[in-house]
């Protein structure tokens, strides 16, 4: 408990120091506000965005599609990862295509999705799903290859069905890798939504970044970036909490 309090106090002190430097250094160096706004400028602009730029609705839209894209992409990645892990034949057949899609830059698909589906929420959702899909798939597939074969053979010796072996042996063994993939994917989900909104969105924080950049309103851009970061941190925190509850049986290293 004392270590946690010490770390918290140290983190708050560092944040306060950074904000103080940020508040006073740019004006002292005559840096224009449209280049680097101070925290007080950002707070003032945040109030204006709340009143004039429909900030709540735009933030809610980004948060909604971040969670939705993360959920769909993670579910597809985990399901296909487990299916390929259970079938060596289909893994070898599909691996080249999966590798090709994994290497391809996902953000490059955003303009295609816009041409296909128009300027709406579908392109940013699809980009998010595509970006989230691969980290989960790769982690699950790698974990399935490292499942203890002795445990699988023991389960077969007890006449367990294929489904029972998966539920009792393979799924618990791969949960740590799955959760690691989900935590990675949670940070990428925010990127996917933002790219979709930057390229062709008409709502969301990415749209506000584009709009603020066009007006040379750096404070608006900074505020949108901060809110995107908060969304990502909240999603990551929820997953970390879920991981602690699901994997409570794994011993933690004391620091």
Image: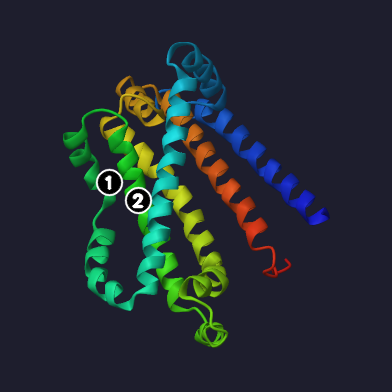
In terms of sequence position, does the residue under pointer 2 or pointer 1 come before the other? 1
Label total for image? 2
SS type, badge 2: helix
Residue at the far top: name it.
Answer: 51
Residue pictured at 39% horizontal, 43% vertical: 191
Label 2 crowd (10 A; few <14 / some 14-19 / many >=20): many
Locate residue 252, reporting x and y percent.
69, 67
Residue 222, image quadrant: top left
**In this rendering, is residue 9 above or below 145?**
above
Locate residue 200, reporting x and y percent.
26, 31
Residue pictured at 21% horizontal, 30% vertical: 118
Residue 230, image quadrant: top right
Query: Is the C terminus in the top left, top right, bottom left or bottom right quadrant?
Result: bottom right
SS type, badge 1: helix
State left or right for residue 99 relative to residue 234: left
Would you say the residues marked 2 and 1 are in contact, meaning their CB atoms lie under 8 Å apart? yes
Q: Is residue 137 visible?
A: yes
Disc 1: which residue: 107
Disc 2: which residue: 131
Residue pictured at 16% horizontal, 35% vertical: 115
């Amino acid at each position: 408990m004392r270590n946690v309090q010490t770390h918290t106090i140290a983190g708050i002190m560092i944040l306060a120091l950074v904000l103080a430097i940020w508040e006073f250094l740019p004006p002292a160096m005559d840096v224009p506000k449209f280049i680097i706004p101070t925290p007080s400028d950002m707070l003032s602009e945040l109030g204006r965005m709340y009143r004039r730029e429909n900030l709540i609705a735009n933030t809610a839209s980004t948060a909604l599609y971040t969670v939705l894209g993360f959920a769909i992409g993670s579910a597809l990645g985990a399901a296909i990862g487990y299916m390929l892990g259970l079938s060596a034949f289909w893994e070898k057949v599909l691996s080249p295509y999966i590798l090709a899609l994994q290497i391809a830059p996902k953000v490059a698909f955003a303009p295609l999705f816009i041409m296909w589906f128009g300027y709406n929420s579908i392109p940013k959702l699809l980009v998010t799903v595509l970006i989230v899909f691969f980290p989960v798939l790769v982690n699950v597939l790698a974990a399935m290859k490292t499942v203890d074969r002795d445990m699988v053979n023991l389960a077969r010796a007890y006449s367990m069905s294929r489904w029972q072996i998966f539920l009792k042996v393979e799924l618990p063994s791969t949960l740590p890798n799955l959760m690691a993939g989900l935590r990675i994917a949670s940070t990428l989900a925010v990127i996917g939504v933002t790219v979709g909104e930057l390229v062709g969105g008409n709502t969301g924080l990415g749209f506000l970044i584009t709009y603020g950049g066009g007006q040379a309103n750096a404070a608006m851009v900074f505020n949108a970036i901060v809110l995107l970061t908060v969304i990502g941190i909240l999603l990551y925190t929820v997953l970390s909490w879920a991981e602690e509850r699901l994997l409570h049986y794994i011993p933690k290293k004391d620091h």
